[in-house]
Image (cartoon, grey):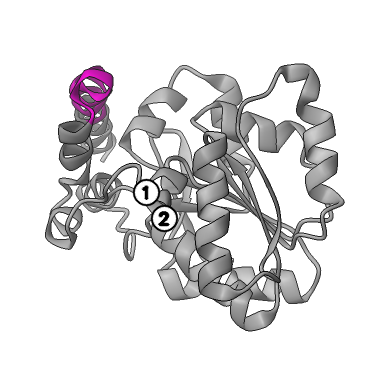
Amino acid sequence: MSSKIVLLKSNIHNLTMAETLALIETAILQKKQLHHVVVNAGKLVAMQNDDELRKSVNSADIINADGQAVVWASKLLDRPLKERVAGIDLMQEVVAMAHQKNFKIFLFGAREEVVSKVSQKYTSSYGPNLIAGYRNGYFDASDESEIAREISESGANILFVAISSPIKENFLFRHRELLKNVNFIMGVGGSFDVIAGVTKRAPLWMQKVGMEWFYRFMQEPRRMWKRYLFGNSKFMLLVMREWWGDKVRR
């Protein structure tokens, strides 16, 4: 595994997209398990006061920087990350790899109509052998063990979980042992909605300048305004506080 940095109480591996994909392929071929998670500004803010989420994230085998703001913060704090590895981009690359290498995937999360559409799209693009199974993301806590067992017994090499934080991270952490037959486990947030066409992704230029959050906000202002207004402001405050602390220590 490559070197890692610590930023706002989170470990983050200093990996490129290509390096991340190479680690994933090796783990699957060697029948090992990699638990993957991404962090963005919102998740780093949530981790400050959520001990269970922080433990779940930091226990992952690969932690990528999903948000451009995280990469900028790493450079400001003199712990520069090589690049952003966006979760949805990594997911699409892993799906293509699965097709090429005859791996199977399981889709878990989102609404039934969304996850079923993602399954249909991938089956249309890559053929029926890609999908080991799928399930929506609505369940009671009492169902968790049964769901984990269903996924484990599906024959999937790869599990994508499209459930919001911290439910996603905590589910994967709690049922890690039950999911031991799955080689690569990845939380993908709202990626299923994008792939199914329910929401649109920002243009590439907005992704590059770190304005993807604003594009998302414009699509769902009533639901997103509080998350981005308070979350982004708190993230900037936390980064500046850490920058000042580093300066004082030096």
Is residue 49 visible to us here?
yes
Point out residue 168 in the picture as x, y percentages from the top left corner. 58, 33
Q: Residue at x 19, y 24 (%)?
A: 221
Is residue 234 magenta-colored?
yes
Is the residue under label 2 in contact with that under label 1 (CB below 8 Å)?
Answer: yes
Q: Within the magenta stretch, is there residue 155?
A: no
Residue where numbered disc 2 is placed: 88
Q: Which residue is mark 1?
A: 194
How far separated are the C-alphas under marks 1 and 2? 9 Å
Vertical placement of residue 10 versus 206, above or below? above
Badge 1 or badge 2: first in the primary sequence: 2
175 sits left or right of 193 in the view: right
Quadrant hosting residue 245: top left
User: Is the C terminus in the top left, top right, bottom left or bottom right quadrant?
Assistant: top left
Looking at the image, the residue that sits furthest to the bottom is 100
Q: Position of residue 66 (x, y in %)?
A: 37, 50
Occupied quadrant, residue 184: bottom right
- Taking depth in this image into account, of 123 and 4 the one nearest to the observer is 123
Q: Is residue 55 visible?
A: no
The N terminus sits in image quarter: bottom right
Which residue does the image show at 19% across and 32% down from the upper left? 217
